[in-house]
Amino acid sequence: MRTGEVEAYLREHIPLSADMQIDVLEAGPEGVKIEVPLAPNVNHRSTAFGGSVAALAILTGWTLVHLRLRAEGLVTHTVIQSSAVHYDAPIHGTFRAESEPIEARSWDRFTRGITKHGKGRVHVTVHVVAEGIAAASFTGAYVGIAGLKSAGDA
Amino acid sequence: MRTGEVEAYLREHIPLSADMQIDVLEAGPEGVKIEVPLAPNVNHRSTAFGGSVAALAILTGWTLVHLRLRAEGLVTHTVIQSSAVHYDAPIHGTFRAESEPIEARSWDRFTRGITKHGKGRVHVTVHVVAEGIAAASFTGAYVGIAGLKSAGDA
């Protein structure tokens, strides 16, 4: 799946991502990078709105899990169970969320849960970077649920 | 400050809140309730996008802290330091974020920090409700920084 396809899919099915003007720079089972401009994501202080930062990170983590499951031929749907963001520095321009690789052991436990028990959970870390500086860090717990294939999931 | 004024302020200064089509139902120093329709906040499964849920809760908590500081005549700017969301149930329609009252002791410590040390931190809990059911819970840590009055803050 090319970055353009992933971006079109996200923009169509998650309209807030279109409002945020996402630009999918990288999208594969090993890593996802999504960038947004400041203007649609700005707050009253001309810095990035914390809600945009959280939403971008959630989207990035979800895309990584979704693409890696697909790449392994696992039919699931993936939902977020919990998320945590720490904001380290104000963001004054374009910003980007970059997923951290998921460790093999965590991923194996996740997919084993799905194939054996119909359900698994995995934690994904995403870093939000602006002008080369780490501006926020995110951890999300995503749950994959097997066998609920639908047009939107596959 | 009336709910309409608060809504107009948020929509103007945080454009993502306009994209989310926020409807400010209650906005005072004791509590804030903000509702959004599903359509602009939907995901690929026709339920609420986790990023919208997080953004709505962050906005609700911020508005509460901001209005209460204003009501007490404290000139600060308020930024989010960290946020955590737990998603308990999928949301299939309009959803609403409702702030939990901030305990007097926490608030006093917060404002004492601002007046004595120029800075304070307070935790705010927000519940996200859909069709009468608790769908998500949020805790955010907000930092108030004294004396940086600007047009956008007051």
Image (tube, coloured by chain):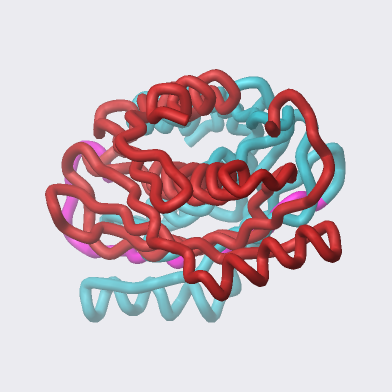
Chain colours: A cyan, B red
Residue A149 part of the magenta segment: yes
Residue A128 is left or right of residue A63, and the answer is right
Q: Nearer the viewer, residue B130 or B5?
A: B5
Q: Residue at x 26, y 28 (%)?
A: B39
Magenta stretch secondary structure, dominant:
strand
Q: Is residue B90 left or right of residue B14?
A: left
**Magenta part of the chain:** A134-154
Number of numbered discs:
0
Residue at the spot x=85%, y=64% of the render?
A: B117
The one of A139 and B62 positioned closer to us in this rendering: B62
Lateral position of residue B62 relative to residue B49, left or right = right
B103 to B14, vertically: above or below = below
Q: Which residue is most to the left? A: B131
At a point 73% along the width and 28% down the height, the residue shown is A46
Residue A101 position within the rendered picture, expressed as x and y whole percent measured from the top left: 63, 62
x, y (%) of residue A105? 54, 80
Note whether A135 is above or below B2 in the view shown. Answer: below
For residue A67, say whether it is visible.
Answer: no
In the foreground, A140 or B80: B80
Residue in view at x 60 percent, y 29 percent: A41
Asked if residue B45 is among those painted magenta in the image, a careful observer would answer no
